[in-house]
Image (cartoon, grey):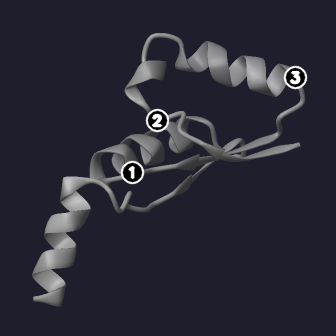
Amino acid sequence: MIDVHAHINDNDFDADRNKVIKRAVDTGIRVIIDASIDYKSGIASLEISRNYKGIIYTTLGMEPGLNEYKKISEATTG
């Protein structure tokens, strides 16, 4: 089974991230696709995926509602 959209990089998981991942694997999850929403979460996700090779994979992206995205969008569209 594959979890195709997780935010395991979220700060809410800082205290128990390893336990959450272990519980997912123990219940049959073989792959977790970790979605980032900005630069900071993308870096965190990449670091996590390095520690869980073959289990966690990172997607890099930006959430359109965030200020960071709005600034880039305004700068590139005039």
Q: Position of residue 38 (x, y in %)?
A: 33, 53
- Residue drawn at (82%, 39%) of the image: 30
Residues tagged 3 and 1 counted as in contact (Cβ below 8 A): no
- Residue drawn at (72%, 19%) of the image: 22
**Does dot 1 land on a helix, a strand or a loop?**
helix
What is the spatial separation of the Cα atoms under label 2 and label 1, in whole angstroms? 8 Å
In the picture of the structure, the residue carrying the numbered disc 3 is 27
For mark 3, does the 10 Å Cα neighbourhood hold few (<14), some (14 to 19), or many (20 or more) residues? few
In the picture of the structure, the residue carrying the numbered disc 2 is 9
Instruction: In the rendered view, tell whether residue 60 sits above or below residue 24.
Output: below
**Does dot 2 land on a helix, a strand or a loop?**
loop
Closest to the observer, 38 or 69: 69
Q: Position of residue 46 (x, y in %)?
A: 45, 48
User: Is the C terminus in the top left, top right, bottom left or bottom right quadrant?
Assistant: bottom left
Instruction: In the rendered view, tell whether residue 55 sits above or below residue 66.
Output: above
User: Is the N terminus in the top left, top right, bottom left or bottom right quadrant?
Assistant: top right
- Going by the image, does 6 lie left or right of 22? left
